[in-house]
Image: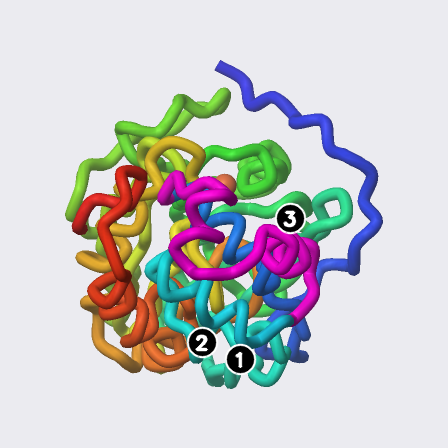
């Protein structure tokens, strides 16, 4: 089997950026109206039903869906979509951006263009053995290859969070330039590239310092995996598209599954865990517990004071 190059859309975004050499100021992945749309789709709540539950006019709902920050309306909507009203209002006000963690060694972040969007990939390494692992590739491996060379690293493994094209577009180039073993979860659709598969809770080690645990956090894709990494400056969770700063991974059909496993497996990690998502900026679990409309403390309570349980309301997680 030969790695096939993936045709890419025109690259109109920024050039690859590397962290911590300089800080990529990546915009939040989702706006407040993206979050509302994602929650409505995920929980299958129609516009008419949402307007009825929230006691708002269809015109006000439409205005919010089109990006008008009507804060009182936004708060009422949040309570019926399991969203934290404070966090959603803060997102609408553009009043917060996650404080970026510092990794003095063993970690680099790459942000590569994908059409008008960008996608993240990561490199981690053991500072003694100089063994490294990539988490996804993004659309351009140039920055990652530069760091491998400049830091004198050997790329031993290439871990794939999920096989959506933006996350593996540069895999052929990375495989061609290194001896890295490609890994993805056994449930994920097969890569058109030689690879090995792993199961839930598989462990990997880089030298004596760095341990990597595979957590199945699926829903956005069948085998989407969070790689929980210890031995660096901070606990690190590379979550792919399961979770974003201030938002959640989307899924047309399995949103409930994604929401449930995110709570069970990602939100349960130590609160100082750095979240490294597939899109958008780095964040931390402590910050997301306060500012993520889907997962902030008020989000779990929100549906309890809905006036009635509608037929199209979400099932309890
Ligand atoms: Fe994806």
Residue in view at x 56 percent, y 83 percent = 96
Residue pointed to by mark 2: 87
- Residue 10 among magenta residues: no
For the question of whether residue 123 can be seen, the reply is no
Instruction: Indicate which label's residue lies in the foreground, 2 or 3.
Output: 2
Instruction: Please state the horizontal and vertical placement of residue 314, each as a whole percent of the image.
Output: 27, 45
Give the residue displayed 70% in from the left and 50% down from the top: 117
Q: How is the image coloured?
A: rainbow
| Residues at discs 2 and 3 in contact (Cβ within 8 Å) | no
Q: Main secondary structure of the magenta part?
A: helix
Q: Position of residue 208 (x, y in %)?
A: 23, 68
What's the distance in space between the residues labelled 2 and 3, CA to CA? 35 Å
The reply to whether callout 2 and callout 1 are in contact (CB within 8 Å) is yes
Give neighbour class at mark 2: few <14, some 14-19, many 20+ (Cα, 10 Å).
many
**Tag shown at residue 90:** 1
255 or 233: nearer the eye?
Answer: 255
Q: Is residue 229 above or below residue 101?
A: above
- The residue furthest top is 1
Q: Please give the residue where the numbered disc 3 appears in the rendered image.
A: 141
Residue at the image point whose x is 53% and y is 75% from the top: 72
Q: Which residues are magenta?
A: 43-69
For label 3, the crowd category at 10 Å Cα-Cα, with few meaning under 14, some 14 to 19 and many 20 or more, is many
Residue 138: mark in rendering: none
Secondary structure beneath disc 3?
loop
Residues under labels 3 and 1: Cα distance? 35 Å
């Amino acid at each position: 089997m030969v790695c096939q190059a993936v045709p890419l859309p025109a690259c109109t975004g920024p050039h690859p950026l590397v962290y911590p050499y300089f800080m990529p100021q990546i915009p939040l992945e989702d706006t407040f109206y993206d979050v509302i749309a994602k929650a409505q789709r995920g929980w299958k709540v129609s516009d008419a039903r949402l307007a009825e539950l929230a006691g708002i006019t269809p015109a006000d709902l439409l205005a919010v869906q089109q990006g008008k920050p009507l804060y009182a309306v936004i708060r009422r909507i949040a309570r019926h979509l399991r969203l934290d009203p404070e966090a959603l209002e803060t997102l609408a006000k553009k009043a917060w951006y996650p404080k970026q963690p510092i990794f003095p060694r063993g970690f680099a972040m790459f942000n590569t263009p994908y059409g008008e969007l960008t996608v993240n990939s990561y490199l981690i390494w053991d500072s003694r053995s100089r063994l490294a692992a990539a988490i996804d590739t993004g659309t351009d491996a140039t920055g990652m290859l530069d760091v491998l060379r400049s830091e004198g690293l050997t790329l031993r493994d290439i871990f794939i969070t999920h096989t959506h094209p933006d996350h593996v577009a540069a895999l052929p180039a990375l495989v061609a330039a290194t001896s890295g073993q490609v890994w993805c979860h056994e449930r994920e659709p097969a890569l058109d590239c030689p690879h090995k598969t792993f199961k839930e809770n598989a462990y990997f080690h880089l030298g004596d310092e760095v341990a990597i645990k595979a957590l199945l956090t699926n829903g956005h894709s069948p085998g989407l995996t969070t790689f929980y990494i210890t031995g660096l400056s901070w606990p690190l969770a590379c979550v792919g598209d399961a979770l974003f700063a201030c938002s959640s991974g989307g899924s047309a059909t399995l949103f409930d599954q994604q929401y449930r496993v995110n709570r069970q497996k990602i939100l349960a990690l130590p609160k100082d865990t750095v979240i490294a998502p597939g899109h958008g900026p780095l964040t931390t679990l402590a910050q997301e517990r306060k500012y993520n409309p889907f997962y902030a403390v008020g989000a779990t309570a929100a549906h309890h004071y809905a006036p009635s349980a509608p037929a199209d309301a979400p099932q309890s997680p």
